[in-house]
Amino acid sequence: MMRQYELVERVQRYKPDVNEALLNKAYVYAMQKHGHQKRASGDPYFSHPLEVAAILTDLHLDEAAIAVALLHDTIEDTDATRQEIDQIFGPDIGKLVEGLTKLKKLELHSKKAEQAENLRKLLLAISDDVRVLLVKLADRLHNMRTMEAMRADKQIRISEETMEIYAPLAGRMGMQDLRDELEALSFRYINPVAYRMVTDRLTDYVARNADLIETIESQLGERFEAAHIHARVKSRQKTAWSIFRKMERKTLSFEQLSDIFGFRVVVYDENDCYRALGAIHREWSMVPGRFKDYISTPKQNGYQSIHTTIVGPSRQRIELQIRTEDMDQIAEYGVAAHAAYKEGRKDPLGQSHAFANLRRTIETLVQGEAPEEFLENTKLELFHDQVFCFTPKGRVIALPRGATPIDFAYAVHTQIGDTTVSCKINGAISPLMTELVNGDEVEIITSETQTPPAAWENMVVTGKARAAIRRATRMAIRKQYSGLGRRIIERAFGYAGKEFSIELLTPHVHRFGQRDPLDVLAAVGRGEISSNDVMKLVYPDWQGDRAAHLDSSARDHARPRDRQGWFGLSAGPGMLFHMPRNGQGEESHEAGTEGEAEGRDALPIRGVTGDLPVSFGAAGAVPGDRIVGILTPGRLITIYPIQSDALIAFEDQPERWVDVRWDIDSALGERFPARIAVTLINQPGSLATIANIIADLDANIHELSMTRTATDFTEMRIDLEVWDLKHLTRLQQALRECDMVSDIRRLFG
């Protein structure tokens, strides 16, 4: 176990003016508090915070972070209190220790909703001070190094949590070495068989190629010396986990991998990076498509380097990374390499590009999403490899792999994403679902009249885009429902001879459990709140009932009656029906003097795939039918033809009737349901004949049943999908002309 003076000496190596008193005080306090506590392995418990502190000294963190590492378990596992730590070490250290104590209690590998909420708390905590994250990562690393004494199920649970949450966070902070070790240790417990296989093969490969590696290092060094470039060349090898992941992702065997080894070239300054690149490419051929310049376009975690792959001196592929010493430090230590920590500044936020990006991402993610959405979006946003694309003006946009132009648009600005209609990629018009690759220049074309379709949610990969699309979809649906609800309430108020306005509703919003009047209107539109309930709340003295409404309305609205349809439905006050007029417009069949004005307010029915959930009655309805909607809580709006038998059941419930009209875009090519009954001669091949006629007329059979009505006759009940009423009429005529058909009729129930 490391002694007190050894810890101080480790910090002094990179920070000569270390506050020795603080480190000594924290060491002694933590050792006394943990006393004789033991870990599961039997080691003294104090060895754990001490090793966490040692890991942070390898990252060259300041003495405040080291002190927090020593103290991070004292509040939870000993009788230490926040107040006591504040008094001895100051409130800043006390706050960090308490924050880590709370994080330790979070169970990230729990039920999905709980896991999401706990991850939200973790991210909020680390967004306050990056040192919380660094101590937590070091704590997790030491725990992963010392899990042998734990039960196998606990080892797997902690390893999966590390692989899903902590290793990607370390990578997002640019701490690649720490990420590699976390992934390797997790891989060892999650899949021990694969871990041993890859590790053994890798050990054998290194032994067999030791001379080749030395030769390549020597030849690269000679080439740089000839070009008068001072460079340090060192080899590196892929980790067991990255090898296994690539073998799985690309379905390769170990022998097929060409990039197990790579070489890092470290030079003096940025100019030397490009000089070294030129010296290499003049000597050896570059592999096309394997060049990336992360110096001119750094990664979000601050990583900078030039990557290239060449065909080396022995005709094998060689991966090279060219960077300066400072870039190498950032690649190794990530956010911890930033001078803000070495200088002991109180607030390092904004000093690190990686942490500033993480904080902005967290702020976007944690704003009021459902737990499951938050968990999904966080993993999408934080834990994916990245591609870099450009706006036409040259601004760099970093996105997860698999991102589309829609993700790009939302990354630029939410308003641009919401109004996107098309895009150009590298100057060519391209589909919005195109997967972007590094270096793409993307131009987004927008329209003020556009709103994002709900289907986009399945096309995007970034959390920001998904959240914005869901929000826009919810708002569009809310707008439709609130418009429908307003018409329902205005009709009810009109029956009672009352005027309706939003101002009348506003004081009563809270009594419906809603946030604002539009939410109340939307709830009425969804059938969750009755228009009668709104009437009674706004006008407490109102005593009208349904019969009175109908009687008074009949008296007040004496007008010509259209008796078509069941039980004189069209005579119902305020009920309107619309059907296409020769495909050019709408012919209004009205029950009253409102006519076209009220028809324009009828709910447009575009089919069953729109944002406003509607369904059709069992017998269906097609464009051209006169239709009516029935509002049903839970099932929303069901559409029936005016002739439907089912409407009899709603004759005495006028508050559930909704004015609807067809609003069909022929370009969408959507079919609609209808039901027919065909009586035909019972002979072989009759079913095939009927099916062929239907197919020849471009209709579709959705469901079919047959009933023997007599020895010589069979009745078929056929549920069809057709374009419109004209299409259905042509189909019925074609079937009627068939010799074996005795009778055909349309069913409405």
Image (cartoon, helix red, strand yellow):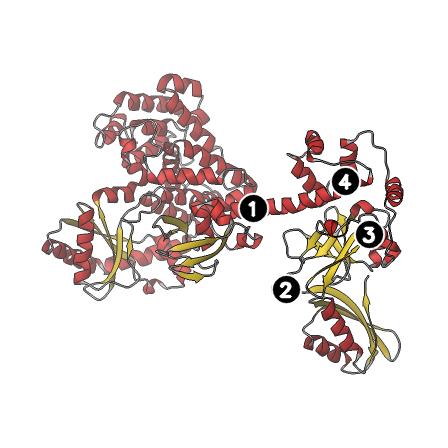
Among the two numbered marks 3 and 4 on one chain, the one whose residue lies closer to the N terminus: 4
Residue 666 circle label: 2
Q: Nearer the viewer, mark 2 or mark 4?
A: 2
Residue 36 occupies quadrant: top left
Among the two numbered marks 1 and 3 on one chain, the one whose residue lies closer to the N terminus: 1
**CA–CA distance in space, label 1 to label 4:** 26 Å
Q: Position of residue 708 (x, y in %)?
A: 85, 74
Q: Which residue is drawn at 53% across and 54% down?
A: 456
Q: Residue at x 70, y 46 (%)?
A: 484
Neighbours of disc 3 within 10 Å: few (<14), some (14-19), many (20+)? many
Q: Which of marks 1 and 3 is in front?
A: 3
Q: Nearer the viewer, mark 2 or mark 1?
A: 2
Give the amino acid at mark 3.
Ala
Could you say which is closer to the camera, residue 691 or residue 529? 529
Residue 581 occupies quadrant: bottom right
Q: Which residue is drawn at 83% across and 47% down?
A: 573
**CA–CA distance in space, label 2 to label 3:** 29 Å
Residue 591 circle label: 3
Give the amino acid at mark 2.
Ser
Q: Give the labeled residue for mark 1.
A: 472
Q: Which structural element holds mark 2?
A: helix
Quadrant holding the N terminus: top left
Q: Which structural element holds mark 4?
A: loop
Relative placement, left or right, of 336 versus 603 is left
Among the two numbered marks 1 and 4 on one chain, the one whose residue lies closer to the N terminus: 1
Neighbours of disc 1 within 10 Å: few (<14), some (14-19), many (20+)? some
Q: Which structural element holds mark 1?
A: helix
**CA–CA distance in space, label 2 to label 4:** 35 Å
Q: Is residue 35 at least partly visible in the picture?
A: no
**CA–CA distance in space, label 1 to label 3:** 37 Å
